[in-house]
Image: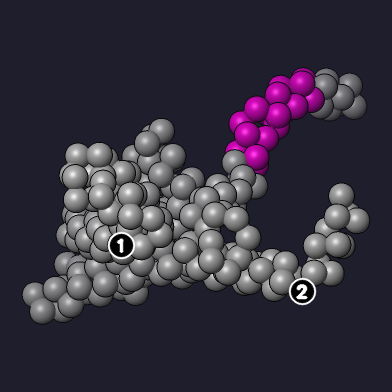
Amino acid sequence: MFETLKNVFRVKEMRRKLLYLIWMIFIIRIGCQIPVPGVDSDFFKQWFSSNAGDAFNFFDAFTGGSFERMSIFALNITPYITSSIIMQLLTIAIPKLEEMQKEGEDGRKKIASITRYVTLGLALVESIAMAIGFGRQGLIKDYKDMSTLHYVTSIIVVIAVLTAGSALLMWIGESITENGVGNGISIVLLINIISGMPSDFATLYNTFVARQLQEVFLPLQLSWQFYLL
């Protein structure tokens, strides 16, 4: 396997693509750590922990933890995935789109362009819903002491940043497909899921292994202390 990797890095084109992929992964993980300006991240962590469920945990895994942190990539590529599914369904229902798909490469490019616009629209709607829905609950810092203009400005900033973050990830995914290795959107999803695995393993260890070890060794420890006394 190591010999295969060596051979891959000897090829200049593959080396360039792999380095580009690594650079894009680095950008994704950095973006998942940067909080949205004006947002109280602690509020959202508390809200997330109190409303934890299968749906939220699944969504947070898809976003690589950026949803829980309310980072600039909080929406991640979910708007793009949703828009792709919508376009596939519309292609069957609308003859014009079906004709585009049959036109070959030019038609697919047109559908891809429409998909991007639908992605931006969905990201904008989701950003507005999150900013307004959570804004007065404590997501926006010092929301109780804000004047109306200040509050509206903060809401606009949150909407703009979340929408731009989703658009940037969409561009990164497509850029990886063109200049990197493999399907960019799939790689973004894979990186997000892998990034949450260490904390998941730690949770599983603390929940099952550590508790079982404690149940086994605690009686022995008490017995030893009693013996010493």
Which residue type does callout 2 highlight? Answer: Lys
The range drawn in magenta is 201-219
Circles 1 and 2 in contact, beta carbons < 8 Å: no
151 is higher (above) or lower (below) than 169: below
The question of residue 50 being in magenta is answered with no
The question of residue 213 being in magenta is answered with yes
Going by the image, does 212 lie left or right of 10?
left
225 is higher (above) or lower (below) than 11: above
Residue 83, image x and y in percent? 30, 51
Going by the image, does 79 lie left or right of 219?
left
Residue 77, image x and y in percent? 40, 56
Q: Secondary structure at mark 1?
A: helix
What coloring was used for the rendering? one colour
Residue at the image position 70 percent from the left and 24 percent from the top? 212
Could you tell me which quadrant the C terminus lies in? top right
211 is higher (above) or lower (below) than 155: above
Q: Secondary structure at mark 2?
A: helix
Which residue type does callout 1 highlight? Answer: Lys
Residue at the image position 20 percent from the left and 58 percent from the top? 125
Q: Residues within 10 Å of mark 2 (few under 14, many from 20)?
A: few
Residue 45, image x and y in percent? 40, 53
Q: Which residue is mark 2?
A: 12
- Residue 74's quadrant in the figure? bottom left
Q: Residues within 10 Å of mark 1 (few under 14, many from 20)?
A: some
Frontmost residue, 143 versus 20? 20
Residue 31, image x and y in percent? 48, 68
Q: Is residue 105 visible to the viewer in this orientation of the structure?
A: yes
Q: Which residue is mark 1?
A: 110
Q: Is residue 134 visible to the viewer in this orientation of the structure?
A: no
Frontmost residue, 50 versus 23? 23
